Amino acid sequence: MDLTAVAKPCDLGDKSTSDVILRLRNGEGRPEWFYSHSVILINKSGFFADQLSNPDSGSCIEIQCSDYTYDHHVNLLRLLYLPTDSLLDSLDSVKSAIGILQLAVAFHCEDITNCCIQYLEAIPWEDKEEEQIVKAVSKLGPIAMPILARIQPVDLSATKNVLVSAVRFATSFGGSCPPFGDELKTSAQEQVEFILGGDEDTPLITADEEVKSVVKMGLSQVCSSFEKELSSLLVILDITTETAENRILQSLSNVEWMCNILPKMDLMKDFVSSWAEMSGKVLGVVEDKKLDNVMWGLKVKLIEVTGKVLEAVGYGNVILPALCRVQLLKTWLPYIRKIKPLLDAKCNKETDFPYKMDEDLCQSIEGAIVSLVLALPSNDQDDILSDWMKTEQVRYPDLSEAFEVWCYRTKSAKRRLEGLDRVGNTTISL
């Protein structure tokens, strides 16, 4: 071949300078002719170099393709004619890059292969695109490792470090709050929930003592922050402002978030203990006259969180001494009994009143309280049921089931004890 011809620029489709014809069968089965140049094909593709080195190959090479890959074949041929430093800028979509990459590997086009890998490794993927990428590049072997490195599982140490950092950020309250601070904290909370989402490695992470220590410290900070925000309501001149309510609801939302993640780490007992410890202070503020007709969202949210605590204790997921269980009930039962009719009255009076205890919440709390009462010593059951029957609002929570069981147990217990006395007084002779 004339060396001067090699130095001249070549364009795909230039019939006047072409010395090779590529016959590409399109989606309809009709061949399309691409006037090409052997100097380009040989330098850029190992496949074409082998084909053109065969004396019997002739000046026409036929390439079979499917409907799906036809456009990718055309794009690959165009890329063969571009300088190496222009290849990356020529790629414009994940779908196209995947298709070209597969062909570039098959045709042994090293520069284009490297370019496609660099593009796919750097550009953001959507979920569907990620599935396509994994399916395509998993067949390419070691050359695809830069892409697969983005999605391969990380080791436990890295996951633990991310979890610890996310928990610390989500439970940090000191210093000035940067722009979008609440959004960033929410994002960190979501990341923690995702990591704790039931993966097979989760138990190994949650059992780590450092992780548990950080989470317990976070619980302490979240509860302390909530108590401070709540106490500040009594000194704020105008607590009817939206800002004041939003601040306290956000603080309580952080407490509820801890309540949701701690069961996944077998630390729900720590939350229950913290909630029981601060319940007296919480109700001391919420039941202050200053809050009588305001902060209804706060009052409902408090009952929701308390409902989760009552469920945990009532159904035996958290084991507490009887004295602690009695104290928990005697602290929150009167408040729940008081707030429920007030919320119902507000809803009946104001059709657009947004705060109420929905049916599911009411049933779950009622069931938990019944279970809690029935697991107490008989004398404590007697005190709680007697107090319940004296109140005007006997309808909620309905402890009729607990009362019936208590009555049955009282009679049967007397018979059993009498039987034990008779057995104890019987003289045994040998």
Image: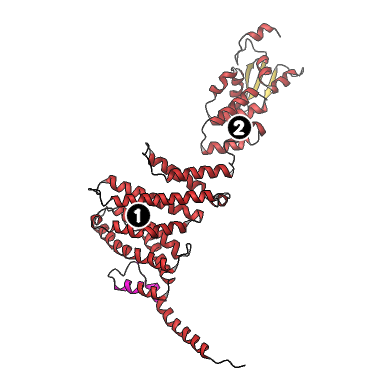
Residue 317 rendering spot, x and y as whole percentages: 48, 62
Instruction: Residue 388: give its label.
Output: none
Quadrant assignment, res 62: top right
Part of the protein shown in magenta:
384-405
Q: 10 Å neighbourhood of mark 2: few (<14), some, or many (≥20)?
A: some
Residue 87 rendering spot, x and y as whole percentages: 57, 21
Q: In this view, does 414 lie to the left or right of 157?
A: left
Q: In this view, does 14 lie above or below 199?
A: above
Q: 10 Å neighbourhood of mark 1: few (<14), some, or many (≥20)?
A: some
Q: Earlier in the sequence, mark 1 or mark 2?
A: 2
Q: Is 404 colored magenta in this rendering?
A: yes
Q: Is residue 22 above or below residue 398?
A: above
* Of residues 95 and 124, the one drawn nearer to the viewer in this rendering: 124
Q: Is mark 1 on a helix, strand or loop?
A: helix
Q: What element carries label 2?
A: helix
**Mark 1 lies on residue:** 301
* Of residues 333 and 357, the one drawn nearer to the viewer in this rendering: 333
Give the residue at x 60% y 19%: 84
Kind of residue sitting beneath label 2: Pro
Tell me how far mark 1 sits from mark 2, CA to CA: 48 Å
Give the residue at x 36% y 60%: 359
